Image: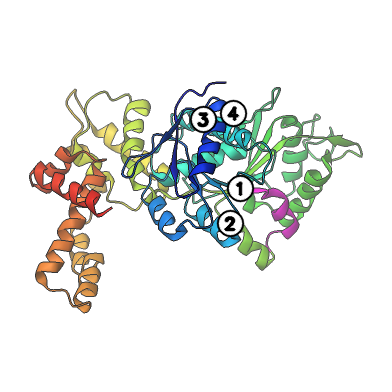
C-alpha cells in the first residue's frame, strides 16, 4: 500500500550497508523515503537511524531545536544502553526500537505513522472547539486523543476555568465505542448530604420523604456511556466509599432497594484540588484515588500558554459575540497583560465586556476596554525597576559584562520576543520594535548560522 507522503529520515550511523537494506525494505512496503539535510525543517513524522556509536548528546541537542510537535521514531541498528533510550525519549522521540530485534519492524513504522495521521486529524478537529496553538496545548490535545482511545478511567486536573468539562465532553465524543450512549455530568459541589446517594444511585418510591416516584441516578443514566464527575474532590468520604464499590464491582443499589443493578460506563473525573495531597491528609480515599486515576491529564493554566490568548479572544469575539469588525492589535496587546487567575473563563468574561461596550461598525479598539479593566499603570511602573529585567541585568553585571554587552543581549532578546509574538512575521515585528525589517532579517540569519 503506497504511502500518501514521503517519509523523511536522517542517518546518525556509519553502517551504510545496513541502512541501505533497511531503506530498501521500507520502499518495498510502499514508503517513499527521503533524506532530510541539515538545516531543513521536518515536513512531518520521520525516522532517526542510530547505533551504539552515535553521539547521542549531540543528537539530543539537535532534537531540542526541532518544533515541539515533530513526531519521531528512533531506529537502532544495534543495541543501545537503557540510559541512551531514555535520553532519546526525554528529548522528544516517541518510539525507540532495534530493527533487528523486533518482529515485522516495517509494520511498527507503518502502524505508528497511521496512528499519528489519525491523531493529527483529530487534534485539528479538536482545535475548532478547544482553541489553542501553543506547544503545551497541542501536547495536551494529543494526550486527550490518546486517552479517548483507551478504556482507562481518566482524571483531569487543572485550575478553575481551564476547560475541564469541555475536555471531558471531547473525550466522550472521541470515544470509539460504536454504540455508546450519553455523557452524564455530575457536579459534586452541588451534592446535598443525605440526598447525594440518590443523585448517584437513584432511589425507590417512598425511600425517603418526598420520594414520590422511582428515580434513576447518574450511574443508571450513564450506562454504556460516560460518567463525568466534576470537582470530585468535593465528594464526602462516606459517599466515596459507596462510589468505590460501584466502580470496583460495576454494581449499585438504589436508595431504599435491596436489588443490585449493573452499570457499565467510561469514568472521567475532574478536580482543581491536589488529590494526592488530600490522600496523604486523609480527606480523600487512597483506594478511590487509584481507581479513578488510570490516566491523569493536567490542563495547563492560561498564564503558561499566553500565545493562545489571541486565538481564544478572536474565537470569543467572532463566535460568541458575532463581531465581524477588525480587532486592533492594541486590544490583543492589552489582553496579554493579565495573569488570568480565572484562566480561560476569566478571559472570556473580559472579552465579553469589551464586546458589549463596542458600538457601531468600526473596529474594536482600545477605547472599548471598560475603565474598570484598565491596568494599574502606577503599580506597573513602580514594579518595573524591581522586576525581572532588573534581576537579569544584575546577574549580567555580576558576570562581568559591561554596558555594551548588556545592551546587545537585551536587544537580541527584544528581537527574539517580538518575532515570536508576531508568529515569525518580520514586518509586523519590525513595526512593533520601531526598527527596519532588514535588521530582523539579519538577526534571523545570524541565528540560523549559529545553529
Q: Which disc, if any, is residue 117? A: 3
Report whether residue 386 is seen: no
Q: Residues within 10 Å of mark 3 (few under 14, many from 20)?
A: some
From the image, state whether disc 2 or disc 4 is nearer to you: 2
| Of 41 and 387, the residue lying toward us | 41
Taking the image as shown, residue 255 lies to the left or right of residue 200, namely: right
Q: Are marks 1 and 3 in contact (CB under 8 Å)?
A: no
Q: At numbered mark 3, what does the secondary structure look like: helix, strand or loop? A: helix
Which stretch did the figure color magenta?
A: 283-296
Image quarter where the N terminus lies is top right
Q: CA distance from mark 3 to mark 2?
A: 28 Å
**Which element is circle 1 on?**
strand
- Looking at the rendered structure, the number of numbered marks drawn on it comes to 4
- Residue under the point 59% across and 28% down: 173
Labels 4 and 3: the sequence-earlier one: 3
- Residue visible at 69% across and 55% down in the picture: 289
Disc marking residue 205: none
Q: Which residue is mark 1?
A: 98
Q: Earlier in the sequence, mark 1 or mark 2?
A: 2
The reply to whether discs 2 and 4 touch (Cβ–Cβ < 8 Å) is no
Q: Is residue 237 left or right of residue 318?
A: right
**Which mark sits nearer the N-terminus, 1 or 4?**
1
Amino acid at each position: 500500500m503506497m504511502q500518501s507522503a514521503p517519509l523523511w529520515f536522517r542517518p546518525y550511523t556509519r553502517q551504510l550497508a545496513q541502512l541501505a537494506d533497511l531503506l530498501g525494505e521500507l520502499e518495498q512496503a510502499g514508503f517513499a523515503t527521503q533524506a532530510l539535510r541539515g538545516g531543513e525543517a521536518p515536513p512531518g513524522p520521520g525516522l532517526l537511524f542510530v547505533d551504539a556509536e552515535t553521539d547521542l548528546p549531540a543528537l539530543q541537542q539537535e532534537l531540542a531545536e526541532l518544533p515541539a510537535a515533530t513526531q519521531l521514531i528512533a531506529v537502532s541498528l544495534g543495541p543501545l544502553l537503557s540510559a541512551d533510550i531514555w535520553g532519546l525519549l526525554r528529548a522528544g522521540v516517541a518510539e525507540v526500537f532495534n530493527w533487528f530485534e523486533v518482529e515485522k519492524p516495517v509494520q511498527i513504522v507503518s502502524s505508528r505513522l497511521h496512528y499519528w495521521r489519525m491523531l493529527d486529524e483529530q487534534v485539528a478537529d479538536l482545535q475548532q472547539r478547544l482553541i489553542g496553538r501553543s506547544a503545551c496545548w497541542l501536547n495536551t490535545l494529543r494526550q486527550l486523543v490518546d486517552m479517548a482511545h483507551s478504556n482507562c478511567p481518566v482524571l483531569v486536573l487543572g485550575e478553575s476555568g481551564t476547560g475541564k468539562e469541555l475536555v471531558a465532553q471531547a473525550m466522550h465524543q472521541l470515544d470509539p465505542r460504536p454504540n455508546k450512549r450519553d455523557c452524564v455530568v455530575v457536579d459534586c459541589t452541588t451534592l446535598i448530604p443525605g440526598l447525594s446517594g440518590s443523585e448517584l444511585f437513584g432511589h425507590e418510591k417512598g425511600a425517603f420523604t418526598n420520594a414520590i416516584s422511582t428515580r434513576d441516578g447518574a450511574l443508571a443514566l450513564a450506562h454504556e456511556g460516560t460518567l463525568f464527575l466534576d470537582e470530585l474532590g468535593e465528594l464526602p468520604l462516606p459517599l466515596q466509599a459507596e462510589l468505590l464499590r460501584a466502580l470496583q464491582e460495576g454494581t449499585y443499589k438504589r436508595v431504599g432497594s435491596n436489588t443490585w443493578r449493573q452499570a457499565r460506563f467510561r469514568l472521567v473525573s475532574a478536580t482543581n484540588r491536589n488529590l494526592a495531597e488530600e490522600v496523604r491528609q486523609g480527606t480523600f480515599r487512597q483506594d478511590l484515588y487509584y481507581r479513578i486515576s488510570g490516566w491523569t491529564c493536567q490542563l495547563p493554566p492560561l498564564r503558561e500558554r499566553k500565545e493562545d490568548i489571541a486565538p481564544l479572544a478572536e474565537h470569543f469575539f467572532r463566535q460568541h459575540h458575532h463581531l465581524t469588525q477588525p480587532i486592533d492589535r492594541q486590544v490583543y496587546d492589552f489582553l496579554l497583560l493579565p495573569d488570568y487567575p480565572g484562566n480561560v473563563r476569566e478571559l472570556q468574561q473580559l472579552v465579553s465586556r469589551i464586546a458589549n461596550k463596542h458600538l457601531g461598525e468600526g473596529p474594536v479598539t482600545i477605547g472599548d476596554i471598560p475603565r474598570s479593566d484598565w491596568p494599574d499603570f502606577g503599580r506597573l511602573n513602580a514594579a518595573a525597576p524591581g522586576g525581572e529585567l532588573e534581576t537579569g541585568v544584575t546577574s549580567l553585571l555580576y558576570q562581568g559584562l559591561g554596558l555594551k554587552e548588556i545592551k546587545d543581549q537585551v536587544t537580541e532578546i527584544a528581537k527574539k520576543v517580538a518575532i515570536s509574538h508576531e508568529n515569525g512575521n518580520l514586518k509586523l515585528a519590525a513595526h512593533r520594535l520601531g526598527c527596519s525589517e532588514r535588521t530582523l532579517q539579519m538577526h534571523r540569519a545570524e541565528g540560523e548560522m549559529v545553529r
